Amino acid sequence: MPAKVVILCGGQGTRIREASESLPKPMLPIGGKPILWHIMMGYASHGFTDFVLCLGYRGWLIKQFFLNYRAMTSDFTVFVRDPSTPSFHRVDDEQNWSVTLADTGEESMTGYRVHCVRQYVEDNATLMLTYGDGVANVDVAALARFHHDHGKIATVTAVRPPSRFGELVTDGHLVTEFNEKPQASSGFINGGFMVLDARRIWSYLSGSPEEVFEREPMQRLARDKQLVVYEHKGFWQPMDTPREYALLNELWSSGNAPWKTWNTAGKNA
C-alpha cells in the first residue's frame, strides 16, 4: 500500500494565539488557504494523497473545512431554485485525496496522537509524519526512498534553523542522540517531515496521553540505533509566532513561496 501521511493538528498554538483566537493553528490562512492545505499540497505534489489528520483543539473547524472543501476552495454558481446543487467552476486536483479526520484528544501530547491513529495506518508499510504548522520544500518522495533504503524504524528530516527546536547529534546518517528543544543548540535540529515503519513503531509508544513523541520514543529509537537523519538544506519555516505567520504570508503574496512545489497555473488557488 502507498504510504499514509499523518499530520499532527491538535495543538493549541499558544505562542501564536494573538494571530487568531478562534482558529486552530493548522487553519491559519496563508494566502487565503489554511497552512494545513499548503502542507497537504506539498505531499500531494509528490504523489502522497492519503492523509490522516490528528485533531484536538477546535478540531471541528478542520472537519467543517473538509466537509465543505469544494465550496471553501472554489468559485461556484448557486441556482436559487435549488441551492443544494451548486455548479463549481473548476475541477480540483485534490479530488483524489483521501482524508481521515480523527479526534485524538483536546489535551493529548504528540505520542498519544500517533498512537490513536494506529488503526488507520498500521496496514501500510510506511507512515509519513509531520506537523500542521510548518512548510518546506522537502522532496518527500526522495525522503521516503531514503527511509526504505536504510531499513531502520524511523527517519527524521534535519534542518539548521533556530536553537529552540530539538537538536540532532549524528554520526553520518545515523542519529546518536536526540535532545528536544535545548537552551542552546548547534548543528542540525528536528524539522519534522518524518518517516516511520508503520508496523514496528508501536512498541516505542506507551499509549499514555502525556507521552511526547519527540522525547522518550525518539530518544529510545536513537539509543537503539533505529533513528536515521535525512538532511534538508533547502527552505524550511515553522509558524510558531505572529512574526513567522506574517513572513509566510509575505512570501506567498510576493509570488516567491519556496514551499510551493505544485503547479496551480490557471486555478483560483
Image: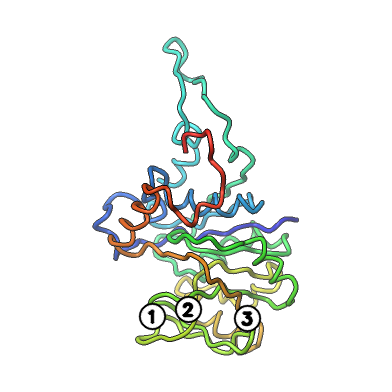
Dot 1 crowding, Cα within 10 Å, few <14, some 14–19, many 20+? some
Disc 1 secondary structure class: loop
Q: For the residues marked 2 and 1, what is the alpha-carbon distance in whole angstroms?
A: 8 Å
Q: For the residues marked 3 and 2, what is the alpha-carbon distance in whole angstroms?
A: 14 Å
Query: Which mark's residue is nearer the viewer, 3 or 2?
Result: 2
From this view, report whether residue 17 is shown above or below residue 67: below
Disc 3 secondary structure class: strand
Dot 2 crowding, Cα within 10 Å, few <14, some 14–19, many 20+? many
* Nearer-N-terminus badge (3/1): 1
Q: Residue 229's quadrant in the figure?
A: bottom right
Seen as rendered, the residue at the extreme top is 81
Nearest the viewer among 252 and 176 is 252
Contact between labelled residues 1 and 2, with CB atoms less than 8 Å apart: yes
Q: Residue at x 70, y 74 (%)?
A: 200
Q: Amino acid at mark 1?
A: Ser
What residue is pinned by disc 1? 163
Q: For the residues marked 3 and 1, what is the alpha-carbon distance in whole angstroms?
A: 21 Å
Q: Position of residue 223 (x, y in %)?
A: 60, 90
Q: Residue at x 33, y 58 (%)?
A: 247
* Nearer-N-terminus badge (2/1): 1
What residue is pinned by disc 2? 189
What residue is pinned by disc 3? 227
Q: Amino acid at mark 3?
A: Leu
From this view, report whether residue 214 is shown above or below residue 46: below
Q: Amino acid at mark 2?
A: Ile
